[in-house]
Amino acid sequence: MQKRKTGMARLWQLAFTKKALVLSSAVLAVLSTVTSFVPFVAIFYIIRELVLNIRDMGGLDSAFMIRLGWLAGGGAIGAILLNFLALMCSHIAAFKTLYRLKIEFTSHLAALPMGFHTENSTGRLRKVVDQNIEKLEGFIAHQFPDLIGSFTAPVVAIAILFSFDWRLGLGCFVPLIMLFVIQSVAMGTSKSKLFIEKYETALEEMNNAAVEYVRGISAVKIFNQTIFSFRKFYETIKNYGDFAYDYTISFKFSMVLFLCLLHNIYIFLLPIIIWMSKGVTDYSQFVMSALFYLIFSLSLSGPFMKILYVSQKGRQIADGIARMDKVLNVAPLPETKSPKTAEDYSISYENVSFSYNEDGGAEALSGVSFTANQGEVTALVGPSGSGKSTIAHLLPRFYDVTEGAIKIGGVDIRDMSSDYLMSIVSFVFQDVFLFKQSIIDNIRIGHKDASREQVVAAAKAAQCHEFIEKLPSGYDTVIGTRNIHLSGGEKQRLIIARAILKDAPIIVLDEATAFADPENERKIQLAFEKLMKNKTVVIIAHRLSTVQSADKILVIDSGKVAEHGVHDALLDKNGRYAKMWRIYIAATGWTLANEEARANV
């Protein structure tokens, strides 16, 4: 893969993605800037004509002055129209570039292994998508035309100034060069570059802490906490403020010098005007030229302030783009060039070992081997942290195994395309996530082309049709709006409806009935009996009652298969499963009681 450019070079590369539009915007911005000077020149000649004929107004060239008036008005209107066209081109280029980048970035995120998402916070990735990439749109749409115009303005101004009187033009040219030098030295130091990096990092940390604070707001309110007691969030805000203050103070001398020089260019003109006045014979002409240069010099501050602003913004955007590229440079799991398909849907784990740490370290799984036959239910049980969910997450290649192989129908899943692999596996995990869309669209994620009748049938099978019908707009109700909120069990059943609608030959259930009450748990199990027919089913369960009838039960402990067999055979072994069963039975009979009641037992 070709190595990406970095820094401002990368920013300009992205800005010129839509080259024709961006170049058109640049040309129009230059023409707009040049045209904007026409009224100044026209008005100068009008005033000059008035001053030269102030004693005898009869000598005024009225036709000439009218032409100059039309020229001034036309120049102003032309500058506005050309600037409008420049912004139109830059905005179209910006939106097209933004669309392409966001699609590329989010598609890349979806292709990255789950390990990347667990190691990188939601706040950081959200900032890249919502802020860093969005800033590029602002740069192309607004700041790029401004930058072109700001660099053109001094050039045109200097050309005009030198064309009238080279001596006074030189008086304006010297401070302009000094301004460029001061700005380049101040903004081009390694300290300035380091600040931009620290600034963006501080914003990321503050964004991460803010997301965590909002997500945990229920705990904050329950324990009567404030932002000051939520230390992480408070410290990120305080550190950012202290850092920004220190950096601002470090620029006080260069910025003061820059601003003083920028707004007082006329000081350089005064000695030249005094020197030139000694040999003047035509004072009217001399006064006109002097006033023109003194007034015109004041107009140079605007373009330079834009250059300063855009340069600073450009460096921030370039750093944001570098953070986006850092994510884009993370390689997704490799895809085979010759994808294969499975002849049947049995699953086999062959001496599978896996570590979440890429550099080695403790293994989450070690030498796991088992077979889940098609048409059978294989249950994974064991204590929390034993590796059950890790086994399930390896099946869709959320991660790749460290050693060994996982096969479906005798084909290594690494030899299948990702699209094919995901099409033959359905998942119902413990962590429930519903999009802020309608109920029907949430269920259709399992099968985007499904008809309404198919969605309703899946909802009925998942025992959620009844509560959906009671919602204000039924299946068209948008979750999370107008105080529409679902219980944990209702959300879980919607996720199950997705899996039923997808109708994949392999089903992985991770505590699928965790939020269901006893009545609905039984209904869901009945629905699953139809869904599981002739399919490969892997169930992860803590409620051992849900796996009693499983065709095979695997007891996972410390990343290894400690026991395997059917329910009765495992009880007869009187091993770990039997112990877990006894604890489970005892727990189901546990009740709250006061001291006196317990004493009477």
Image (cartoon, rainbow, N blue to C red):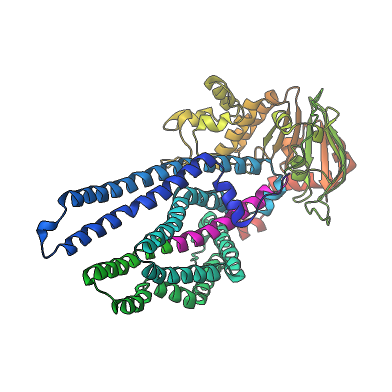
**Residue 444 in view of the camera:** yes
Q: Measured from the top left, where is residue 506 in percent x and y? A: 74, 29
Which residues, given as a range, are shown in magenta?
Answer: 306-331
The residue drawn where x is 46% and y is 61% is: 307
Above or below for 397 versus 186: above
Front-most of 240 and 527? 240
Indicate yes or no whether the magenta region holds residue 582: no
Q: Measured from the top left, where is residue 364 in percent x and y? A: 81, 50
Above or below for 359 versus 232: above
- Determine the main secondary structure of the stretch shown in magenta: helix
**Residue 432 in view of the camera:** no
Q: Quadrant of residue 85?
A: top left
Q: Quadrant of residue 514?
A: top right
Q: Measured from the top left, where is residue 437 in percent x and y? A: 50, 36
The residue drawn where x is 49% and y is 31% is: 468
Tag count: 0
The residue drawn where x is 37% and y is 60% is: 160
Say which quadrant the N terminus sits in. top right
Q: Measured from the top left, where is residue 287 in percent x and y? A: 24, 70
Q: Quadrant of residue 396?
A: top right
Front-most of 595 and 569? 569
Front-most of 67 and 389? 67
